[in-house]
């Protein structure tokens, strides 16, 4: 077995229990909410038949999140729902089903003096600001992790501001000790992408559901959402079991090492063109689902991610390194563990391409 793949056999039979967090049950309410947010768009699902044929698979499909609400990444799905839910909860409003318009929640929050603080290495902060400041009119401060600094080390700074300033809500997509509710709102928000892709897959394949999903993992929120969705009891009963593969850069493979260790561990990180996955510690809320439900952890190098970017760009798909890493992971899995992961001519594989094209230093 390749040292770049870690298999997790117990995940094959694991089922995510409905009612214990994200899954398929609440996706309809979240999708309905997102349709009320300006610039809502259903992102494309591309079919890649030449790649499927080359790899000996039935279908390879790519969910293209390069333009979501006018932003070049998927994060706005989680950020918009999180800001809305967090502000509503702060005001003790019944927003669980998205029934109160976000503009009304924003107006009440402004009257109460609510402000938002967040921390980012890129896409998340921009997404939080878009919803909080632009759409809901709330004062928003975005802390940006400095070059050569750690996201994990910056969290206490943001947390202190939220705890010592009246009516200030910290909105992060990472669960840490004593902070777990808002990260779950992010995970729920990603349900829109999953509800869309389920329907699109059936349309593209003539009614065949996905058998495998491949998702990038940084701190783990999007990985948690994808895993809970594909491993949900309701989905298994309706269409059968699915496998989930998680991809990380070799320079920040905290899930890979945690799966090997059987417990959540932190790892040192280094620079990567996959900067959105440059996380050394998993979200505390994501780890239990990833531990039990991810069938394989896959590491890819910067060069592999870059080559996958070029392959997708040549097919007219404006992928960035984090999103293209899913293709690199599929190629690695087919090379090193195809039989073990049940990848064959009947497989329907969905790649979650989470970011659009951007500049980065080309690896050698």
Image (cartoon, rainbow, N blue to C red):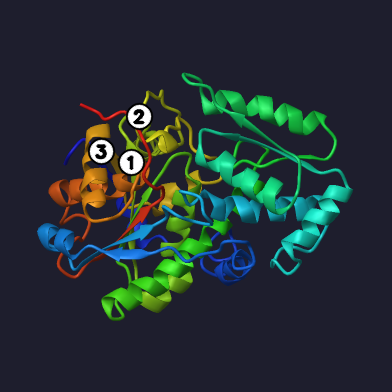
Cα distance between the residues tagged 3 and 1: 6 Å
Looking at this view, name the residue that lies furthest to the top.
148
Cα distance between the residues tagged 1 and 2: 9 Å
Locate residue 98: give its quadrant.
Answer: bottom right
Looking at this view, name the residue that lies furthest to the right.
111
Question: What numbered label is drawn on residue 306?
Answer: 3
* Chain-order first, disc 1 or disc 2: 2
Q: Position of residue 212 (x, y in %)?
A: 30, 61
Q: For marks 2 and 3, give the one nearer the viewer.
A: 3
In the rendered structure, the answer to whether residue 310 lies left or right of residue 148 reads left
Judge the density around disc 2: few (<14), some (14-19), many (≥20) Cα neighbours within 10 Å. many
In the rendered structure, the answer to whether residue 147 lies left or right of residue 352 reads right
Residue found 47% across the figure and 73% down from its top? 234
Q: For mark 1, give the secondary structure.
A: helix
* Chain-order first, disc 2 or disc 3: 2
CB contact under 8 Å: marks 1 and 2: yes
Residue found 44% across the figure and 37% down from its top? 276
Question: What numbered label is drawn on residue 321?
Answer: 1
Residue found 81% across the figure and 44% down from its top? 114
């Amino acid at each position: 077995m390749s040292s770049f793949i870690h298999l997790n056999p117990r995940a094959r039979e694991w089922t995510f229990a409905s009612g214990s967090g994200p899954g398929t049950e609440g996706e309809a309410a979240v999708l309905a909410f997102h349709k009320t947010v300006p610039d809502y768009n259903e992102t494309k699902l591309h079919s890649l038949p030449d790649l499927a044929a080359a790899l000996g698979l039935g279908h390879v499909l790519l969910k293209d999140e390069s333009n979501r609400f006018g932003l070049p990444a998927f994060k706005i799905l989680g950020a918009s729902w999180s800001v809305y839910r967090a502000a509503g909860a702060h005001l003790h409003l019944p927003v669980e089903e998205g029934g109160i318009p976000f503009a009304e929640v924003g107006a009440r929050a402004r009257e109460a003096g609510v402000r938002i603080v967040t921390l980012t290495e890129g896409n998340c902060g921009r997404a939080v600001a878009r919803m909080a400041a632009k759409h809901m009119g709330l004062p928003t401060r975005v802390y940006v992790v400095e070059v050569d600094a750690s996201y994990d080390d910056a969290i206490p700074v943001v947390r202190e501001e939220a705890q010592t300033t009246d009516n200030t809500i910290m909105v992060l997509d990472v669960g840490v000790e004593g902070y777990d509710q808002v990260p779950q709102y992010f995970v729920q928000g990603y349900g829109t992408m999953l509800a869309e892709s389920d329907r699109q897959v059936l349309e593209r394949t003539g009614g065949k559901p996905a058998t495998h999903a491949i998702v990038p993992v940084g701190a783990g929120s999007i990985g948690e959402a994808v895993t809970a969705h594909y491993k949900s009891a309701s989905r298994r009963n309706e269409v059968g079991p699915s496998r989930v593969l998680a991809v990380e850069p070799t320079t920040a493979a905290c899930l890979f090492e945690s799966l090997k260790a059987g417990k959540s561990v932190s790892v040192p990180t280094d620079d990567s063109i996959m900067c959105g996955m440059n996380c050394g510690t998993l979200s505390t809320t994501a780890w239990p689902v990833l531990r039990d439900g991810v069938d394989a952890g896959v590491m890819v190098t910067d060069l592999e991610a870059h080559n996958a970017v070029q392959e997708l760009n040549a097919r007219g798909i404006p992928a960035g390194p984090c999103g293209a890493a899913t293709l690199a992971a599929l190629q690695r899995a087919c090379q090193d563990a195809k039989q073990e992961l049940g990848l064959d001519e009947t497989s329907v594989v969905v790649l979650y391409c989470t970011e659009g094209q951007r500049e980065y230093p080309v690896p050698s």
